[in-house]
Amino acid sequence: MSKSLFILMLSILGFIGCNAQRGSSIDSKEAYGLIKADSNIAILDVRTAKEFADGHVAGAVNIDVNQTDFAQKIDELDRSKTYIVYCRLGRRSRKAVGIMAAKGFKNLYNVSDGFVGWNKNGLPFEK
């Protein structure tokens, strides 16, 4: 095998591995569609308790990614489930998905436009 081909294959494998660790990014409309299609999907809101109280996706569990016990709390979750993870804009949820992937969670979706996108798209939520 040529050196160039070997380097190309390593690059592709590295890219695939990185994507698996980060999970998939979807927008709020796609997230809503997945939630409607599969009642077994778990919804994780990684915003603060105050943000959660101001409004959240129905059925969401709130675990603040910036709290020191975040990693400990997600250890209690079922790793075999599919998780849709969101925050306000998608940054904190991306961080949470990375932590969860490193801890062995496999089926992860980061909502890239967050709860702001959820509201902008007129999707239902509760307080």
Image (cartoon, rainbow, N blue to C red):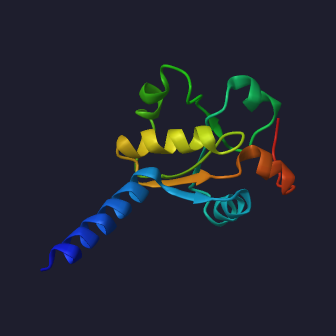
Q: Can the viewer see residue 78 in this picture?
A: no
Q: Is 122 or 2 nearer to us in this picture?
A: 2
Q: Residue at x 49, y 27 (%)?
A: 70
Q: Is 115 or 53 nearer to us in this picture?
A: 115
Q: Residue at x 55, y 30 (%)?
A: 65
In the rendered image, the vertical position of residue 4 relative to residue 59, given as above or below: below
Q: Measured from the top left, where is residue 101 in percent x and y?
A: 40, 46
Quarter the C terminus occupies: top right
Q: Is 76 situated left or right of 112 in this image?
A: left
In the rendered image, the vertical position of residue 96 relative to residue 17, given as above or below: above
Q: Measured from the top left, where is residue 112 in percent x and y?
A: 65, 52
Q: Measured from the top left, where is residue 89 in percent x and y?
A: 70, 43
Q: Measured from the top left, where is residue 79 in percent x and y?
A: 40, 46
Q: Residue at x 59, y 28 (%)?
A: 64
View extreme (bottom): residue: 1
Q: Residue at x 66, y 32 (%)?
A: 47
Q: Is 127 or 24 nearer to us in this picture?
A: 24
In this rendering, the count of numbered labels is 0
In the rendered image, the vertical position of residue 70 relative to residue 111, given as above or below: above
View extreme (left): residue: 1
Q: Is 71 situated left or right of 34 in this image?
A: left
Quarter the N terminus occupies: bottom left
Q: Can the viewer see residue 24 in this picture?
A: yes
Q: Is 20 situated left or right of 66 in this image?
A: left
